[in-house]
Image (spheres, helix red, strand yellow):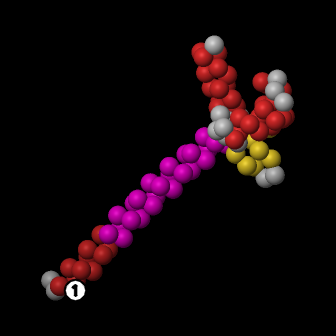
Amino acid sequence: MTENMTKFFKLINILLNVETLLQQILTTLNKQQELEQEEEWMDAYEVRDFFKIHRSTLYRWQCEKIIEPSRMGRKNMYRKSHIQRILEQSHRDT
């Protein structure tokens, strides 16, 4: 086998490994996206109503990274599971 053939087969092997890695990444991203779609979301009004807080309090919590919204279109949306964790944590702290 010539040196060029050896290099060619090594290159093919590398490309196959890259393809395998890309497939794994794609599978992981798809699973993550499915989980996010299953997640329940709340808008700012629902969060404020849930905690019985003013709009400025929600804004302050966002600035302090207590709660982090995800932008969906023109709205800030909040994961319900994250909201529940904040509530549980606040009960433990009191």
* Residue 39 visible somewhere in the drawing: no
**What percent of the width, then of the height, locates residue 41?**
73, 36
Q: Quadrant of the C terminus?
A: top right
State the extent of the magenta-drawn residues as a range: 14-37
Q: Quadrant of residue 59?
A: top right
Front residue of this view, candidates 64 and 48: 64
Q: Amino acid at mark 1?
A: Asn
Q: Quadrant of the N terminus?
A: bottom left
Is 30 left, or right, of 4 in this rendering? right
**What percent of the width, then of the height, locates residue 53?**
81, 27
Residue at point 39% right, 65% down?
A: 18
Residue at point 69% right, 41% down?
A: 63
By secondary structure, the bulk of the magenta-drawn segment is best described as helix
Helix, strand or loop at label 1? It is helix
Is 22 left, or right, of 91 in this rendering? left
Magenta highlight on residue 19: yes
Residue at point 32% right, 74% down?
A: 12
Check the image and name the residue furthest to the top: 94
Q: Quadrant of residue 42?
A: top right
**What percent of the width, then of the height, locates residue 81?**
65, 30
Residue that numbered label 1 is attached to: 4
Residue at point 64% right, 20% down?
A: 90
Magenta highlight on residue 54: no
Check the image and name the residue furthest to the left: 1
**What percent of the width, then of the height, locates residue 87?**
67, 22
Above or below, 11 against 47 in this view is below
Front residue of this view, candidates 48 and 4: 48
